[in-house]
Amino acid sequence: MAWRNLGRNRVRTALATLGIVIGVVAIASLGIAGVALQQQATSDLGGLSDEVTVTPGEDATEDEITDDQVDDIRSLAPASTVVPQKSNQTTLTARNGDEQRVQVTGITNANALYNLTTGRAPERLQSGALVSNSTARTLGLELGDPIEYDGRLYRIEGVIASTEGFGGGGNELVLPPSALSTQEHYDSVTILIDEGRTASGVTGDLEVWFNEGDEEVVSVQNFADVEEQIGSFFETLNLALLGIGSISLVVASVAILNVMLMSTIERRGEIGVLRAVGIRRGEVLRMILTEALFLGVLGGVVGAALSVAVGLVLFHLLTDDPLLVLQWRSAQYVVYGFGFAVLASGLSGLYPAWKAANNRPVEALRG
Amino acid sequence: MTVIELADVVKRYRTGAEEITALDGVDFRAERGELVTIIGPSGSGKSTLLNMIGLLDTPTAGHIRLDGREVTDFSEDDLTEERRSGIGFVFQEFHLLPMLTATENVELPSMWDTGVDRRDRAVDLLERVGLGDRLDHRPAELSGGQSQRVAIARSLINEPEILLADEPTGNLDQDTGATILDELTRLKEAEEIAIVAVTHDEQLVDYADRVVRLVDGVLQ
């Protein structure tokens, strides 16, 4: 009965349903978009979440990390790989005159930090050099070519692959620490956290050991914290977006309320007949309520389908894996959108249904 | 056997600041198998009286008994139950639901009954009123006379004791009206029901077993 009643004025039914569709798509898409954006942001960072970087702090006596401090770090994180580095910048010149500015890093255990496309990264870099992919291409360098730095020559032992994440893919030259002889100590220490510890745990230990009171002797940075901050930012963003999406669904509910009210007022005579022939008030109420719920379900289903489509596109654009949209993290918004639609329509239908059921047959039939 | 009895029924209601007395101490009864016609000028209270008999409204004073049972102070829900099982209605405007077929319209009063299927009875009733070939037609495809016959069939679906007709021939031409009245007469005997009709149409006077005149809320 409810279904046929809705079919009597198809245009009106379609428009009311459209409102719900838009509402559902708004909620679900905004929720999914939030998840997709977060996914993209954290996947870029993903590789760095098990690294901790230590640099000289504001209150350090010298602007360097000393050998003693490196030893302390090693004992605080015995199973982790500790990679002290010296940093500088220079300009390299190719045979044909091309120049490129590069970051110079003096490091011993090169294999810990760098993935190579050609050559082998040595555990102890003593007399060779590594260059990044981009630098090699720009300057036309190959394995075995010599590089001059600070008056000495080093042979290229490997080419570094471009990486994602912060600071990757830049132009780098990697040399033994002895090459940067003007510096006695290190500019930074990178700690690759072993599986038994967390970045936050090691960070905490380092802070306690080095930075007594308010003094910042060393500055410890770990990207896991950054990732967490980004995560909570996105959660807030998500909530805000969902709030906005919900408003549109509320508007759609108001439209349904309007449609149902108009429909029941138009049908006063008919509903009066139903009551006169003995249809109970509860039965009339259920009939009208069912009509409203149908609108919600219909709109919800169409909206959900459209939202999944939008989600596929969003994930494809942002993360290259469109099927990720089907994970609960993002799929839940489609479910919420649908549920909200049905709930909202049901609530909107309550008042018109109650009114219709309680119309006195005598008055309804009079008109 | 008395199906319905009104004893000293008074109905007053307010419109705006005025109080109107629609019925002023009416005694009425109807027996099984009889067609009673209520005639009276506009404003005489005919519709109000019909509403009382049909349990669509409650009296300000007086008593109503359906099948010997006191229903005067019944709640709206209880009155609904009585109407569902005991009273059939035929209206001037037919009041069929446009999106249902003839058969479905006849089944309407029983549609919400779970576990009950009155389709066979609906078809039977439609055949008896001569509409066996129109079972799946919608009201838009039926003539006035045919629609009224569907309405009559509908009024009988729950095997009522009394059928109330408010200007049943009002929207029909003379000949069609006569057909309808023939129908009602046959049914009152076959189903052993009381029929109470309110009308201006003089034809109904001829068909009636008893005529009752209502003037200014009082029966003559």
Image: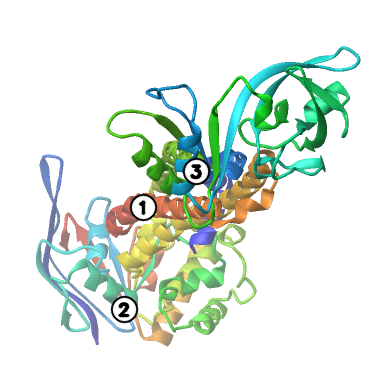
Q: Check disc 1 and report the residue beneath it.
A: A347
Front of the two marks 1 and 3: 3
| Chain assignment, label 1 | A
Is residue B217 in sight in this rendering?
A: yes
Checking the image for residue B86, the label placed there is 2
Q: Check disc 3 and report the residue beneath it.
A: A27
Helix, strand or loop under label 3: helix
Residue situated in front as seen by the camera: A67 or B170: A67
Residue situated in front as seen by the camera: A47 or A260: A47
Separation of residues labelled 2 and 3 (CA atoms): 52 Å
Q: Mark 1 and 3 residues: CB-CB less than 8 Å, in contact?
A: no
Q: Position of residue A283 (x, y in %)?
A: 36, 67
Q: Is residue A200 above or below residue B45?
A: above
- Check disc 2 and give the amino acid type: Gly
Helix, strand or loop under label 2: helix
Q: Is residue A41 above or below residue B100?
A: above
Q: Is residue B195 above or below residue A93?
A: below
Q: Position of residue B204 (x, y in %)?
A: 38, 67
Front of the two marks 2 and 3: 3
Separation of residues labelled 1 and 2 (CA atoms): 35 Å
